[in-house]
Image (cartoon, rainbow, N blue to C red):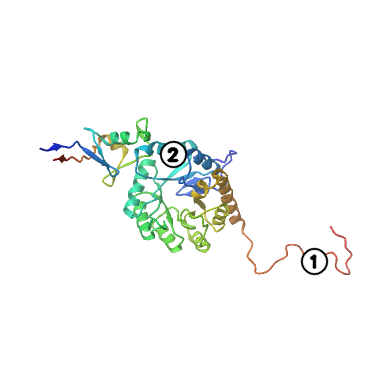
Amino acid sequence: MTTPLPPTITVNGSDRPLAPSTDLAGVVADLAPGLVVDGRPRGVAVALNDAVVPSGEWRTTSSPRATGSRS
Amino acid sequence: MRTTNPDGTAPSDPLTIAGTTLGSRLVMGTGGAASLVALEEALVESGTELTTVALRRVAAPGAGEDAGMWGLLDRLGIRALPNTAGCFSVREAVLTAQLGREACGTDWVKLEVIADDVTLLPDVTGLVEAADQLVRDGFVVLPYTNDDPIVARRLEDVGCAAVMPLGAPIGSGLGICNPRNVEAIAAAASVPVILDAGIGTASEAAQAMELGCDGVLLATAVTRAEDPVRMARAMRLAVEAGRAAAGAGRIPRRERALASSPVTGLVGRPGNLDLAL
Protein backbone atom coordinates (compact mmCIF):
# COMPACT_ATOMS: atom_id res chain seq x y z
CA MET A 1 0.00 0.00 0.00
CA THR A 2 1.49 3.33 -0.98
CA THR A 3 0.52 6.57 0.73
CA PRO A 4 1.21 9.69 -1.30
CA LEU A 5 3.17 12.32 0.60
CA PRO A 6 1.96 15.90 0.62
CA PRO A 7 3.92 18.24 -1.62
CA THR A 8 6.94 19.85 -0.02
CA ILE A 9 9.40 22.54 -0.89
CA THR A 10 13.02 22.79 0.15
CA VAL A 11 13.64 26.25 1.56
CA ASN A 12 17.10 27.13 2.75
CA GLY A 13 17.95 23.48 3.04
CA SER A 14 14.88 22.37 4.96
CA ASP A 15 11.80 20.64 3.60
CA ARG A 16 8.56 22.42 4.32
CA PRO A 17 4.98 21.46 3.55
CA LEU A 18 3.56 23.32 0.63
CA ALA A 19 -0.06 24.34 0.26
CA PRO A 20 -1.61 23.93 -3.19
CA SER A 21 -1.10 26.79 -5.63
CA THR A 22 1.49 28.48 -3.46
CA ASP A 23 3.54 31.09 -5.30
CA LEU A 24 6.86 32.57 -4.19
CA ALA A 25 5.15 35.59 -2.65
CA GLY A 26 3.19 33.23 -0.44
CA VAL A 27 6.29 31.35 0.61
CA VAL A 28 8.06 34.58 1.60
CA ALA A 29 5.04 35.93 3.46
CA ASP A 30 4.73 32.65 5.32
CA LEU A 31 8.39 32.26 6.14
CA ALA A 32 9.28 35.85 6.92
CA PRO A 33 6.20 37.98 7.54
CA GLY A 34 8.33 40.69 9.13
CA LEU A 35 10.06 41.27 5.81
CA VAL A 36 6.89 42.04 3.91
CA VAL A 37 5.59 45.54 4.60
CA ASP A 38 2.31 46.63 3.06
CA GLY A 39 2.50 43.65 0.76
CA ARG A 40 5.93 44.65 -0.51
CA PRO A 41 9.16 42.82 0.32
CA ARG A 42 11.77 44.70 2.27
CA GLY A 43 15.33 43.49 2.58
CA VAL A 44 14.57 40.03 1.27
CA ALA A 45 15.31 38.31 -2.01
CA VAL A 46 14.63 34.92 -3.52
CA ALA A 47 16.79 32.65 -5.64
CA LEU A 48 15.33 29.59 -7.26
CA ASN A 49 17.95 27.00 -8.12
CA ASP A 50 20.69 29.65 -7.95
CA ALA A 51 18.86 32.18 -10.12
CA VAL A 52 17.45 35.34 -8.54
CA VAL A 53 13.73 35.80 -9.07
CA PRO A 54 12.80 39.53 -9.12
CA SER A 55 10.13 40.38 -6.58
CA GLY A 56 7.87 41.54 -9.37
CA GLU A 57 7.69 37.95 -10.58
CA TRP A 58 6.94 36.30 -7.23
CA ARG A 59 3.19 36.29 -7.77
CA THR A 60 3.55 34.53 -11.09
CA THR A 61 6.25 32.10 -10.11
CA SER A 62 5.07 28.79 -8.76
CA SER A 63 7.13 27.12 -6.10
CA PRO A 64 8.95 24.03 -7.25
CA ARG A 65 7.41 21.00 -5.62
CA ALA A 66 9.07 17.87 -4.46
CA THR A 67 6.47 15.16 -4.23
CA GLY A 68 6.98 11.62 -3.21
CA SER A 69 5.38 8.59 -1.75
CA ARG A 70 5.83 6.57 1.36
CA SER A 71 5.49 2.82 1.32
CA MET B 1 20.91 60.28 2.79
CA ARG B 2 22.26 63.33 4.53
CA THR B 3 23.70 65.91 2.18
CA THR B 4 24.57 68.53 4.77
CA ASN B 5 26.48 68.70 8.02
CA PRO B 6 24.56 68.81 11.31
CA ASP B 7 24.84 72.60 11.27
CA GLY B 8 23.28 72.77 7.82
CA THR B 9 26.46 73.48 5.89
CA ALA B 10 27.62 71.41 2.94
CA PRO B 11 30.19 68.70 3.60
CA SER B 12 33.55 70.31 2.99
CA ASP B 13 35.48 67.16 2.28
CA PRO B 14 33.14 64.50 0.93
CA LEU B 15 34.05 61.01 -0.20
CA THR B 16 32.91 60.22 -3.71
CA ILE B 17 32.47 56.63 -4.85
CA ALA B 18 31.20 55.88 -8.34
CA GLY B 19 29.79 59.38 -8.58
CA THR B 20 27.96 59.24 -5.27
CA THR B 21 28.99 61.71 -2.60
CA LEU B 22 29.15 60.71 1.04
CA GLY B 23 29.58 63.31 3.74
CA SER B 24 31.40 60.93 6.07
CA ARG B 25 34.57 59.00 5.38
CA LEU B 26 33.73 56.45 8.05
CA VAL B 27 31.91 53.36 6.80
CA MET B 28 30.37 51.26 9.50
CA GLY B 29 29.50 47.60 9.79
CA THR B 30 26.66 46.22 11.83
CA GLY B 31 28.11 42.92 13.04
CA GLY B 32 28.59 42.32 16.73
CA ALA B 33 26.14 44.90 18.05
CA ALA B 34 24.53 43.93 21.33
CA SER B 35 21.13 45.20 20.21
CA LEU B 36 19.47 47.35 17.59
CA VAL B 37 19.18 50.18 20.12
CA ALA B 38 22.90 50.06 20.85
CA LEU B 39 23.65 49.89 17.15
CA GLU B 40 21.46 52.88 16.38
CA GLU B 41 23.16 55.02 19.01
CA ALA B 42 26.59 54.06 17.70
CA LEU B 43 25.68 54.67 14.07
CA VAL B 44 24.31 58.11 14.87
CA GLU B 45 27.39 59.05 16.86
CA SER B 46 29.70 57.79 14.12
CA GLY B 47 28.16 60.11 11.55
CA THR B 48 28.36 57.38 8.95
CA GLU B 49 26.33 57.56 5.77
CA LEU B 50 27.18 54.07 4.49
CA THR B 51 26.79 50.88 6.47
CA THR B 52 27.40 47.28 5.49
CA VAL B 53 24.71 44.67 5.94
CA ALA B 54 25.35 40.94 5.80
CA LEU B 55 22.99 38.81 3.75
CA ARG B 56 21.86 35.57 5.29
CA ARG B 57 19.30 32.93 4.60
CA VAL B 58 16.06 33.83 6.27
CA ALA B 59 15.26 31.84 9.36
CA ALA B 60 11.72 32.51 10.46
CA PRO B 61 12.56 33.33 14.09
CA GLY B 62 15.13 35.93 13.01
CA ALA B 63 13.08 37.58 10.33
CA GLY B 64 11.74 40.26 12.66
CA GLU B 65 15.24 41.31 13.61
CA ASP B 66 16.23 41.60 9.96
CA ALA B 67 13.22 43.83 9.35
CA GLY B 68 14.30 46.00 12.26
CA MET B 69 17.68 46.55 10.66
CA TRP B 70 16.09 47.83 7.46
CA GLY B 71 13.79 50.13 9.36
CA LEU B 72 16.73 51.45 11.35
CA LEU B 73 18.85 52.30 8.33
CA ASP B 74 15.86 53.85 6.58
CA ARG B 75 15.05 56.00 9.57
CA LEU B 76 18.64 57.20 9.95
CA GLY B 77 19.02 57.94 6.25
CA ILE B 78 22.01 55.63 6.00
CA ARG B 79 22.74 53.90 2.73
CA ALA B 80 22.87 50.11 3.07
CA LEU B 81 25.87 48.36 1.55
CA PRO B 82 25.09 44.66 1.22
CA ASN B 83 28.11 42.44 1.62
CA THR B 84 29.04 38.89 0.74
CA ALA B 85 30.60 38.07 4.10
CA GLY B 86 30.95 34.37 4.68
CA CYS B 87 31.22 33.44 1.01
CA PHE B 88 34.03 31.02 0.26
CA SER B 89 33.68 30.72 -3.51
CA VAL B 90 33.12 32.89 -6.55
CA ARG B 91 29.73 31.26 -7.14
CA GLU B 92 28.52 31.93 -3.60
CA ALA B 93 29.73 35.50 -3.68
CA VAL B 94 28.16 36.32 -7.05
CA LEU B 95 24.80 34.81 -6.11
CA THR B 96 24.84 36.57 -2.74
CA ALA B 97 25.62 39.88 -4.45
CA GLN B 98 22.73 39.35 -6.84
CA LEU B 99 20.41 38.58 -3.94
CA GLY B 100 21.65 41.70 -2.18
CA ARG B 101 20.86 43.81 -5.21
CA GLU B 102 17.32 42.49 -5.24
CA ALA B 103 16.84 42.71 -1.46
CA CYS B 104 18.37 46.12 -0.94
CA GLY B 105 17.58 47.80 -4.23
CA THR B 106 21.18 48.81 -4.79
CA ASP B 107 23.88 47.89 -7.28
CA TRP B 108 26.54 48.48 -4.66
CA VAL B 109 28.17 45.50 -3.02
CA LYS B 110 31.00 45.00 -0.60
CA LEU B 111 32.58 41.94 -2.13
CA GLU B 112 34.21 39.34 0.07
CA VAL B 113 35.53 35.99 -1.07
CA ILE B 114 37.05 34.43 2.01
CA ALA B 115 39.80 31.80 1.78
CA ASP B 116 38.97 29.89 4.94
CA ASP B 117 37.11 30.29 8.19
CA VAL B 118 40.23 30.34 10.36
CA THR B 119 42.18 33.27 8.97
CA LEU B 120 39.21 34.96 7.26
CA LEU B 121 41.75 36.31 4.80
CA PRO B 122 40.61 37.10 1.26
CA ASP B 123 40.98 34.53 -1.52
CA VAL B 124 42.38 37.10 -3.89
CA THR B 125 42.24 34.91 -6.98
CA GLY B 126 38.56 34.28 -6.48
CA LEU B 127 38.04 37.90 -5.48
CA VAL B 128 39.35 39.27 -8.77
CA GLU B 129 37.29 36.74 -10.72
CA ALA B 130 34.09 37.55 -8.81
CA ALA B 131 34.73 41.28 -9.10
CA ASP B 132 35.14 40.96 -12.84
CA GLN B 133 31.84 39.08 -13.16
CA LEU B 134 29.93 41.52 -10.99
CA VAL B 135 31.29 44.63 -12.70
CA ARG B 136 30.21 43.16 -16.04
CA ASP B 137 26.78 42.60 -14.48
CA GLY B 138 26.47 46.28 -13.62
CA PHE B 139 27.50 46.22 -9.97
CA VAL B 140 29.44 48.92 -8.15
CA VAL B 141 31.99 46.67 -6.51
CA LEU B 142 33.89 47.54 -3.34
CA PRO B 143 36.16 44.55 -2.71
CA TYR B 144 37.65 43.57 0.62
CA THR B 145 41.20 42.58 -0.23
CA ASN B 146 44.56 42.01 1.36
CA ASP B 147 47.27 44.65 1.58
CA ASP B 148 48.98 43.66 -1.68
CA PRO B 149 49.36 46.63 -4.05
CA ILE B 150 49.40 44.35 -7.08
CA VAL B 151 46.07 42.75 -6.19
CA ALA B 152 44.65 46.21 -5.59
CA ARG B 153 45.77 47.16 -9.07
CA ARG B 154 44.14 44.06 -10.58
CA LEU B 155 40.88 44.91 -8.82
CA GLU B 156 41.01 48.42 -10.18
CA ASP B 157 41.80 47.04 -13.65
CA VAL B 158 38.60 44.97 -13.71
CA GLY B 159 36.57 48.05 -12.82
CA CYS B 160 36.08 48.08 -9.06
CA ALA B 161 34.79 51.41 -7.76
CA ALA B 162 37.07 51.29 -4.72
CA VAL B 163 39.59 48.97 -3.13
CA MET B 164 39.41 48.03 0.51
CA PRO B 165 42.65 46.56 1.84
CA LEU B 166 42.78 45.05 5.29
CA GLY B 167 44.89 46.51 8.04
CA ALA B 168 44.92 43.20 9.88
CA PRO B 169 42.70 40.11 10.00
CA ILE B 170 38.99 40.67 10.53
CA GLY B 171 38.09 41.31 14.14
CA SER B 172 41.71 41.11 15.32
CA GLY B 173 42.06 44.71 16.43
CA LEU B 174 45.75 44.56 15.55
CA GLY B 175 45.69 47.84 13.66
CA ILE B 176 47.65 48.30 10.45
CA CYS B 177 50.29 45.56 10.30
CA ASN B 178 51.84 46.67 7.02
CA PRO B 179 51.53 50.43 6.77
CA ARG B 180 53.99 50.67 3.91
CA ASN B 181 51.84 48.49 1.70
CA VAL B 182 48.68 50.38 2.61
CA GLU B 183 50.47 53.62 1.81
CA ALA B 184 51.64 52.18 -1.52
CA ILE B 185 48.11 51.10 -2.42
CA ALA B 186 46.75 54.55 -1.59
CA ALA B 187 49.49 56.29 -3.55
CA ALA B 188 48.91 54.24 -6.68
CA ALA B 189 45.12 53.94 -6.75
CA SER B 190 42.91 56.09 -8.94
CA VAL B 191 39.79 54.91 -7.08
CA PRO B 192 39.04 55.49 -3.40
CA VAL B 193 40.96 53.32 -0.94
CA ILE B 194 39.08 52.36 2.21
CA LEU B 195 40.98 50.63 4.98
CA ASP B 196 38.85 47.66 5.95
CA ALA B 197 39.39 45.30 8.89
CA GLY B 198 41.83 45.17 11.76
CA ILE B 199 41.14 48.53 13.33
CA GLY B 200 41.04 48.31 17.11
CA THR B 201 41.09 51.87 18.31
CA ALA B 202 40.88 55.44 17.10
CA SER B 203 44.57 56.12 16.59
CA GLU B 204 44.67 53.32 14.01
CA ALA B 205 41.80 54.87 12.08
CA ALA B 206 43.68 58.15 12.07
CA GLN B 207 46.81 56.36 10.89
CA ALA B 208 44.92 54.85 7.96
CA MET B 209 43.88 58.30 6.83
CA GLU B 210 47.38 59.69 7.35
CA LEU B 211 48.70 56.92 5.12
CA GLY B 212 46.51 58.28 2.36
CA CYS B 213 43.37 56.18 2.61
CA ASP B 214 40.16 57.88 1.58
CA GLY B 215 38.07 56.24 4.25
CA VAL B 216 37.90 53.62 6.96
CA LEU B 217 35.46 50.75 7.37
CA LEU B 218 35.07 49.18 10.78
CA ALA B 219 32.55 47.35 12.90
CA THR B 220 33.97 45.27 15.73
CA ALA B 221 36.08 48.09 17.13
CA VAL B 222 32.88 49.97 17.84
CA THR B 223 30.22 47.32 18.37
CA ARG B 224 32.34 45.32 20.81
CA ALA B 225 33.97 48.24 22.59
CA GLU B 226 33.09 48.64 26.26
CA ASP B 227 31.30 51.85 25.34
CA PRO B 228 30.29 51.59 21.66
CA VAL B 229 28.80 55.06 21.45
CA ARG B 230 31.90 56.71 22.87
CA MET B 231 34.13 54.68 20.56
CA ALA B 232 31.97 55.57 17.57
CA ARG B 233 32.51 59.23 18.32
CA ALA B 234 36.23 58.63 18.74
CA MET B 235 36.38 56.92 15.35
CA ARG B 236 34.55 59.77 13.66
CA LEU B 237 36.95 62.31 15.11
CA ALA B 238 39.96 60.13 14.32
CA VAL B 239 39.01 59.79 10.68
CA GLU B 240 38.50 63.52 10.42
CA ALA B 241 41.79 64.22 12.21
CA GLY B 242 43.74 61.76 10.11
CA ARG B 243 42.30 63.19 6.93
CA ALA B 244 43.20 66.70 8.01
CA ALA B 245 46.72 65.65 8.95
CA ALA B 246 47.23 63.89 5.63
CA GLY B 247 46.27 67.08 3.83
CA ALA B 248 48.38 69.27 6.09
CA GLY B 249 51.67 67.59 5.25
CA ARG B 250 53.61 66.17 8.14
CA ILE B 251 57.18 67.23 8.83
CA PRO B 252 59.93 64.96 7.54
CA ARG B 253 61.34 62.44 9.97
CA ARG B 254 64.86 63.29 11.16
CA GLU B 255 67.51 61.20 12.81
CA ARG B 256 68.48 63.99 15.22
CA ALA B 257 66.85 66.73 17.23
CA LEU B 258 66.07 70.07 15.65
CA ALA B 259 65.44 72.97 18.00
CA SER B 260 62.12 74.62 17.43
CA SER B 261 63.18 77.91 19.08
CA PRO B 262 65.79 80.33 17.68
CA VAL B 263 69.28 79.52 18.89
CA THR B 264 70.50 83.10 18.63
CA GLY B 265 70.02 85.71 21.36
CA LEU B 266 69.93 83.24 24.23
CA VAL B 267 69.91 84.82 27.70
CA GLY B 268 72.52 84.16 30.33
CA ARG B 269 75.43 84.10 27.94
CA PRO B 270 78.63 85.94 28.96
CA GLY B 271 78.94 89.40 27.51
CA ASN B 272 75.23 89.83 26.85
CA LEU B 273 72.98 92.57 28.17
CA ASP B 274 69.85 90.50 29.01
CA LEU B 275 66.76 92.44 27.92
CA ALA B 276 64.32 89.63 27.35
CA LEU B 277 60.97 89.97 25.54
Determine the image quadrant of residue A68.
Answer: top left
Residue B194 against residue B39 in the figure, above or below: below
Most foreground residue, B157 or B147: B147
Residue type at tag 2: Met
| Badge 2: residue crowd in 10 Å (few <14, some 14–19, many ≥20) | some
Rendering coords of residue B65 (x, y %): 41, 38
Residue appearing at x 54%, y 56% in the figure: B208
Residue type at tag 1: Thr
Horizontally, residue B207 falls left or right of residue B73, namely right
Q: How many marks?
A: 2
Identify the subunit bearing mark 1.
B
Secondary structure found at label 2: helix
Rendering coords of residue B181 (x, y %): 50, 63
Which mark is in front, 1 or 2?
2
In space, the residues marked 1 and 2 are separated at their CA atoms by 65 Å
Most foreground residue, A31 or B204: A31
| Mark 1, residue position | B264
Identify the subunit bearing mark 2.
B
Rendering coords of residue A40 (x, y %): 35, 33
| Residues marked 1 and 2 touching at CB (< 8 Å) | no
Can you tell which mark lies on residue B69? 2
* First along the sequence among labels 1 and 2: 2
The answer to whether marks 1 and 2 sit on the same chain is yes
Determine the image quadrant of residue B63.
Answer: top left
